[in-house]
Image (cartoon, coloured by chain):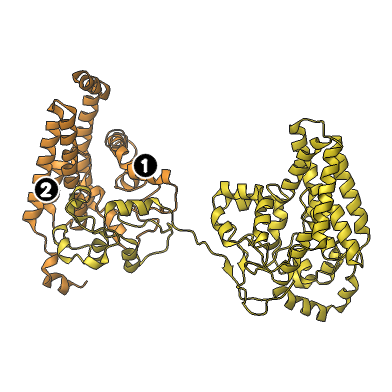
Chain colours: A orange, B yellow
Amino acid sequence: MNMKMKESSSLYELSMATYFLDLILSSVIGYIALTLSYIANNLLTEMLFLISGSIFLYRALFFIHEIAHHYQKLKWFKWTWFAMIGSPFLIPPIFYYKVHLQHHSNKYSTINDPEYQNLKNSNILKKTLFLFLPVLSPIFLLIRFTLISFLSIFSKRINEWKISKGSSLTMYLEDYERPLLNKKELKELHISELILFMLSFLYLISIQRFSFYGILRVQLLEY
Amino acid sequence: MSHTYSKKKTKKLTTQKEQIEDSIDIQSSLFSFLWAPLNSNLHKLHHKHPQIPYHNLRKVENMKEYNYKSLTQAMFNFLQKEKDIFEFVSSKEDDFHTTRRKEILKKYPEVKKLFGRNPWTSVFILITVITQMGLAFLISDSSFLYQFLLAFCVGAFLSHNCFVLIHECGHNLVFRKVFWNNIFCLIANIPLLAPTAIAFKKYHSLHHSKLHRIGVDADLPPLWEAKLVGNSSFKKALWLLFFPIFYAIRSSSVTKIKLICPWVIANIASQVLALGLILGLGYSNILPYLLMSFFFAIGLHPLGGRWMQEHFHVNDCEQHTNSYYGIGNLVTFNVGYHNEHHDIPHIPWSRIKEYRRITSNFYDNLKPVKSWTGLVMDFIFNPKMSLFSRYKVEEEKKNVANW
């Protein structure tokens, strides 16, 4: 695609209104549904709210993909997304920027593609594990923004490792090094990391206070 | 479900065309927004035009380019393994051994001196049969485990030697007269219990003259058998264990042979007589040992690698016939020299080494099989190895020879 074709075709124009409206609507509906599922008094409505809430929040989360593709054009949108969705889910947009573009470059399906794995001929167990690996990502992210962020202040080596290997959204846990970040992007990473460091600490404290087990027990007692 | 995920991870860069071919479009539906937010079901399209924002993707949607109609279809396909190629390696190289035979005889006419018979083989036949039967009688009162171990470690080799010596007789390499060769076939057959010797002789002559012909060469598994076994390790091991049964079934479908003849009847009669004697004298407890030896001799045992070595494609090396020059030849009457045997079947086992020495420059460039045990393990555990790892030659319909 050359530049002329890009400009002539209206297909390539981003509709900011659509982006903002879609993001705000789906995240607000998602959060409301999630809240409703907590105060629901029977299992059926709770599950219904939970599922619909996760569908809408999943949609809102998916905007990180659009942000990665149109990083320069979606500046304000990016921070809105981070405020509404990125920060509670501990995902800064910079984690996907450039990383995802490698998947679209000629590095597709190579060892430098973070979103490709030769799975077709692996056994069913590995395939299912791959489908459910994202379930574990909150744990990894929590460790990333507490322990590793904290340690990286003191150690230069950990800091380098954190930026090159611990700051990308990938599909697998094998060795992958993200493309280098320039000064401006590094600054962005630090800002979002500071916010997420505090937030994840908040999470940790709340987990300690309420604990999953406690929440579960209370809910079970209700029925 | 965005890609096929069938490419191997390498350092080789890919083109956009390859990317698009490897990506998947799933048809949009009323519910696709549930599992594919922001039109991510159109992933092939997205890889084609990554700069188009999500809200415009539907506008360029091409109805003909879908890979799947629904997510279920795509998931089902993803969870399935890539289909294995279920086909033999086709070969147009006819009469491969005949050509080489002519070349060898032209270059080394002195090998003709090695042709002929070795009557001493008959003594080995008697020794082998007596040893095997004697051993069977000796340990008939032992525990099953002991019998099993002995059958694996010793009996299998003796039974295997019976097969090899029947093969020698089958090529009439013992006596001048066919009659005496056949008589010793019958004698060597006794410890094997199943009356296979004369029938084997017939099928084997076809195996030599019509190598790798489907439906004619009984050594080549028929399509149904190869498909049944596939490349699962468990099935391959099971197949190897019951190989004699499969061989019996597959050879019954070879129609070119007139099986029933006086010698086959004599073979069956002699085996029935031997079995009757064993049972009549009250020695039925030797049968398990003999049966186990028989199954180990050509089945799930390092010796199973012996016949597999002959025509399977070993170590990614597609040769019509492979030889084995290892230590196993010492106890198996040089049966590993299979390329040599196919080139010139008129040389008895005792002189095949001499032949190999004379014509070494014909065989030195061929890749030999290094280990029978290794081959059996490779066959079972290597998913690339299956019954299909061998040549087939399509049979021409005309000139059907009468054997």
- The residue beneath circle 1 is A157
Who's the residue at 42% across and 46% down the image? Answer: A124
Residue displayed at 30% across by 51% down: B72
Q: Chain of mark 2?
A: A
Residue shown at 88% from the left, 53% from the top: B125
Q: Which residue type carries mark 1?
A: Arg
Tell me the element at label 2.
helix
The one of A168 and A104 positioned closer to us in this rendering: A104
| Amino acid at pointer 2 | Leu
- Is residue B49 among what the camera can see? yes
- Locate the C terminus of chain B and report the quarter of the image it occupies: bottom right
Coordinates of residue A101 in the picture (x, y in percent): 27, 58
Residue B309, image x and y in percent?
69, 58
B321, above or below B129, in the image: below
Chain letter of disc 1 in the image: A
Residue B371 visible, this angle? no
Mark 2 crowdedness (10 Å alpha carbons): few <14, some 14-19, many ≥20: many
Q: Which mark is residue A23?
A: 2
How many numbered marks, from 0 up? 2
B283 and A63: which is toward the camera: B283
Crowding at mark 1 (Cα within 10 Å: few <14, some 14-19, many 20+): few
**Is residue A212 or residue B403 the one in the foreground?**
B403
N-terminal of the pair, mark 1 or mark 2, is 2
Along the line of sight, which residue is nearer the eye, B166 or A22? B166
Q: Is residue A102 left or right of residue B134?
A: left
